[in-house]
Each structure stands twice: as structure tokens, then as C-alpha cells.
Amino acid sequence: MIGGFQTNVIQAKWNATVTKNCPLCDGIDDQKHRFLYCPAVEHIRHQHQDALDVLINHRPQWIYHPIAQLSDKQAVLHRSLEAIPDGTQPCEVPNSTSHLRFYTDGACHNPTDENIRVAGWAVVCDSSPSAVSREEACAWLTPDEFRTPFLTCIATGLVSGSQSAARGELSAFVTACKTAVADINCISAEIYTDAQYILNLIAIIENGSLQPNLHHTANPDLACELDHLWKQKSFVVHKVKSHRDFSSANSPADLWNIVGNALVDKAAGASLQRIPGEMQQLIHDIKQFRKREKHNLSLVLSYLVDLNRCRTELIRKATAKNVTDQLPDHPLKLAMGSEAREAMTTYALDNPIKLVNGTLDEDLCKCFLMGSHLAHKMWIWLSMLDWPSEETWDTPPASWGISFLELMINFSQCSGMAIPLTLEGKGSTKTYVPYFSQEALMLPHTKRAGSHQSLALRKAIQTFQTLTKTKVFPVDTKKGCFSMRRLHYKGDALGLAVRPSIPKADLTMRLVEKYVADLKGARGLNLPLPDIVEVPIIPDPSFAEIDVQSRYRAYWRFHDREK
């Protein structure tokens, strides 16, 4: 986006053909002029008064880089969160026995926003003496009243260090483990959690792969603590599903786990109430600041889009007017449809320029990844193209240019082949199928679309220029060449701004005109190329085709030699 708004002052530093003046009012075209003062786009600024207020009074730096800022209070909040003490300490267990049971959970305020989230945690101890006592207690539980003296919250706290829901879950789990290890009566322990993250971490610890992978493990400090605390033979972790209804329980034991998880979930949520009022105010202020920043940035970006669209249209009209004023009237100036097709069909040059001559060396052909036969035929086809001299580039139909679709249809009719389709793989493992083969015909139309062949031809031309260090086209590729528009194509076709004289011109232009008509007004070249109609005029090469792996190796041998 920033590149799209590069001013003439900046362009003039690296392009000697560009002046510093605004093309619309002749002022110095810097950022302030373009966005705030250019009289040619005054009507656009009038429509975006709020955006101008932001740029002038609040965010003047956005005329250079429209990037949202962080609140000044963000650093204060970050330091406040870092100052939260570690609360994962051993707790006293009511009615301590040799076997302890815990439920753990974490909670998070603003969980999806890493800049302002705050996490908490809780541990509930289950002091029930047996499964029978738990089953008896279940008989008195209801969804509205599920308190029981056996389930006691023994610890809650805010997370220290980085803040996330996962760190809250781990803080609670570590606290339960510390409590079990510190209890003199404890021999074994069961810990229930609804976090799959915890189970995954325990599995990593038990198979001994935590330390080698600690550098890319989340919450490494707590993970190391858990690694030292965990007793594989004495401790067991159970996964429970969170937020279940009592009615979904399939046994008293399952109901007891639902109740334990619900209580620890409620306690973890309550831990967030311990967030100090000053910190809550900081979070509120930061959220409000970001809301205003987002609103202001949306206003400015909307203004920049409308401004750029308006300037582009004004410059296009001014350029078109200048070109029209400079050029004498030409009988083909307004030619469209069949008249334009006829002009492109009969287009011939008195003194054509050849950019490609002869045949391509066999060794270079074998460096062409899409196929050595394709390279051989395409080079011969390129040698058949006649280019106009530069002084006639502004004269129709040379000035209409030529699309890559026209070039691709012309090449296929002259050679009897098109660029092969890639089925799978990349590099030396690519699998190609000939474009006009039965296997290719079974593929979706989108795979064989003219737009794909146009891009493939552009890539092939770039490869030729790399291999041969020869410029095979006189001008660079551009979007929106006018030849297809003359045939009533509605979209912007990729192509060249200068038109050559082509072999098989009559057949090619009839096929192109039919292709455009079959699009029925569509703006994309989504139809396949036409079938081969006549006998090709480019013969097959005398050498045999080689496989993809051999072409790949040949290309890289050539590449290494060129280095």
C-alpha cells in the first residue's frame, strides 16, 4: 500500500525521467502536498473531513506510514503483570490421607488478546474417603446446589509472567503437584484437568523428551518445575470434559467429576476478581485507545483508497488526452469487433525487426524444465514474430499491443502443442501431462484455463531470457493491453504494449474472437485454449525428449556454470 502512494519527489531520486512536480497541478509532489493540499483532489478531501482531522491534528506521521500505535499505558500494564508474584506454592490439605485427589483449572480475561489478557487459576482438593462416600454425596447434588464438604478450594491466584489460559492451567496443575509432594502423608495422587495441553506435556515428560525440546516448549519455566515434580509411578492425570450438564453423567463417578470440574472452573473464574482496580483501569484504557486507533486508521485508509483511485483516474484521463492531442487521426482509432480483428489479421510490416533468430542449442533446450521439445518449438516460433520499429509503436494496430492469450493460441496453432500441465510435485519431482492429451482433458477447466496458460507463457519467456541472455520481447509485460478490449473483452488481459506481426494470423484472430465471445462477458480467461485446427507449421525436433529429472539436473548444471 505504501508503495502505491510513492510520490514524485521519491521517484525522482531513482528515476531520472520523473520530475518532482505533481502531474495534476504542477506543485511539488511530496506527501503533504498529495494528501493535504493538492487542489485537483479537493473534492475528495471534502468527503473525508474526519480523516483529514486525524492526519493534521492527531496522527501527522500517517501521511508517511499509516500504522496504528500502541497505547503508552501498554508498557505500564506489561510491567505490572511481570510484578505479579509466583503463587504456585504447596497448600495445606484438609483431612490429608495417603491418596490425594485434585481438580485444577485456569481462566483468562481477554483470552484472545495477548497484549491485555490476564490469567488466573484454582485448585480444588477432593477429601472424600472412598468411592462409596462420593456416590452417597451425589444423591444430594442438584444443578442449583452442588456444594459438598468433600470438595474444597485450597488455592487460587493470578498467573505470574506471560499471560495465557494455558499458563493458568499449568500453574494450577503445578500447584497441585507441589501440594502432593509436600504432604507428608501422600503416597499417590490423582489430578483431574480439562486441558489437553496438560496431558500432552505430561506425555512429553514421561517419555523423556522435554529437555531436548525445551527451547520451543511453551511456558518452559513451569514445564521444568513440573518435570522435577512429576512422579510417574505415584501420580496419575485424568482428562475431564469441561462445562457438562449434570444430566449428561453416565455414572455417579462421572457426575462427581462433572461437579469437581464445575467447582474448580468457578473458582478459577473468581480468581480474576483479584485483578487490582488500577490494573483493570489500565486494561480498560488500553482497549478504548485501541478502539479509537482502529476507527481513526479506518478513516484514513478509506481516504487514501479514494484519493488514490481519484488521482489514478485523473492522471489516466490527462495522459489519454495528451496522447490523443499529439496523435493525428487514424482510420483505426475507433475500430472495434470484426473491424479490429481484420486489422490485426492483415497487420504486416515493411521493415520488421527480428529479436530471435535460428534454432535453440540442444543443450539449452534440455535445461528447459517444462520440456526440451517445447523449448525447441517455442524458440522457432519466437523467431517467426516480426516486431515494428520503435517509431511506429504509437500507430494502430501496433499500439494496441498483444495479449499473452493471443500469443499462446498462436503458438499452439503453429506448433501443435501448448505448455504442459503440472499434476503434482515440484522441482525434479514434478509430473507433467501434455496440454492436449486425453489425461489433460479429464482435468477441470480451471486447470486448463487460458489465464493459466498466459502466466505459464510469461514464465517460459523469463526462462528463455535467463538461459540465452537474449531479450525476446521488445517491451516488458503489462496488464491491460488493448487488443482484447478491441474484441469486446471486459477484463484486463496480461500482455505486451506493442504488437508483432504473427504467423497464421487469420486463424489465430478468428479463434481469439470466438474465445472472447464464448466468455459471454466474463472478466477472466477461464476457458481452455482452442483445439488444434490446422496442421502445425513447426516440425518436431530431431532429438528425443528427456525426463524431468534429467532436465532439472541440466538446468542446475547450467546455473552453476553461469555462476
Image (cartoon, rainbow, N blue to C red):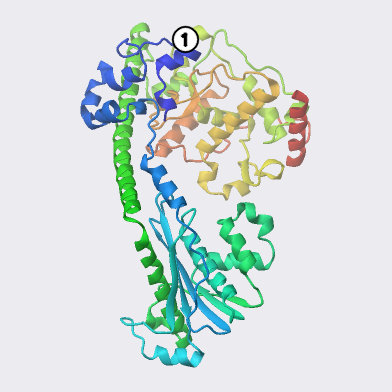
Residue at 51% from the left image edge and 31% from the top image edge: 405
Q: Which residue is mark 1?
A: 17
Q: Is residue 439 above or below residue 4?
A: below
Q: Residue 60's image quarter?
A: top left
> Is residue 321 at all visible to an observer of this figure?
yes
515 shown above or below 60? below
Q: Which quadrant does the C terminus fall into?
A: top right
Disc 1 crowd rating (10 Å Cα; few below 14, some 14-19, many 20+) is few
Give 285 or 542, whichever is nearer the viewer: 285
Secondary structure state at the residue bearing disc 1: loop
Total labels drawn: 1
User: Residue 427: where, in percent of width, then height?
Assistant: 68, 41
Please report the residue visible at 52 percent of the width from the left and 83 percent of the height from the top: 96
Across and down, in percent, residue 388 comes to: 53, 12
Residue 328 in view in this figure: no
Q: Name the residue: 36% across, 6% down.
A: 326
Q: Where does residue 3 sit, x and y in percent of width and height?
A: 44, 26
Horizontal side of residue 467 vs 348, given as left or right: right
Q: Residue 190: x, y in percent? A: 56, 78
